[in-house]
């Protein structure tokens, strides 16, 4: 079916799939299968929960849910707020 769609129809279908749900699920029961992310963070499109950073488009959280990565000097830094972890290897 996708192969028969026109570019505008395909774009509309993708936009609809990536839109946050209007009837949000209970975050405690949600399995977070539909996620959206950007430079600010990641959010669940089904329940609205912030999963990483400040959430998708930074609209949902004032505090960062850190996601640390290792740097060259063997320290950890959050990819969203650049917080340095006190735990080093």
Image (cartoon, rainbow, N blue to C red):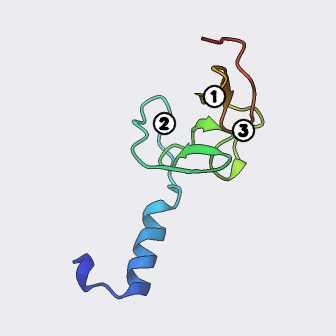
Q: Is residue 4 above or below residue 73?
A: below
Residue 57 in the figure: left or right of residue 31 = right
Q: Which residue is mark 3?
A: 61
State which quadrant residue 81 falls in: top right
Q: Residue at x 47, y 42 (%)?
A: 25
Q: Is residue 37 above or below residue 67?
A: below
Q: Which residue is mark 1?
A: 72
Q: Residue at x 26, y 76 (%)?
A: 2
The Cα atoms of the two marked residues, 1 and 2, are separated by: 40 Å
Q: Residue at x 57, y 44 (%)?
A: 42
For mark 1, does the 10 Å Cα neighbourhood hold few (<14), some (14 to 19), or many (20 or more) residues? few
Q: Position of residue 13 (x, y in %)?
A: 40, 73
Residue 77 in the figure: left or right of residue 28 = right
The Cα atoms of the two marked residues, 2 and 3, are separated by: 18 Å
Furthest-left residue in this view: 1
Q: Which residue is mark 2?
A: 26
Q: Is residue 52 above or below residue 7?
A: above
The quarter in which the N terminus is drawn is bottom left
Which secondary structure lies at badge 2? Answer: loop
The Cα atoms of the two marked residues, 1 and 3, are separated by: 29 Å
Which secondary structure lies at badge 1? Answer: loop
Q: Residue at x 66, y 11 (%)?
A: 87
For mark 2, does the 10 Å Cα neighbourhood hold few (<14), some (14 to 19), or many (20 or more) residues? few
């Amino acid at each position: 079916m996708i192969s028969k769609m026109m570019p505008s129809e395909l774009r509309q279908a993708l936009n609809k799939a990536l839109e946050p749900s209007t009837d949000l699920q209970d975050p405690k029961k949600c399995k977070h299968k539909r996620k959206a992310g950007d430079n600010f963070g990641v959010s669940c499109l089904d329940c609205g929960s912030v999963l990483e950073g400040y959430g998708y488009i930074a609209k949902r959280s004032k505090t960062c849910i850190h996601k640390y990565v290792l740097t060259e000097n063997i320290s950890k830094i959050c990819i969203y707020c650049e917080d340095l972890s006190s735990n080093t290897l």
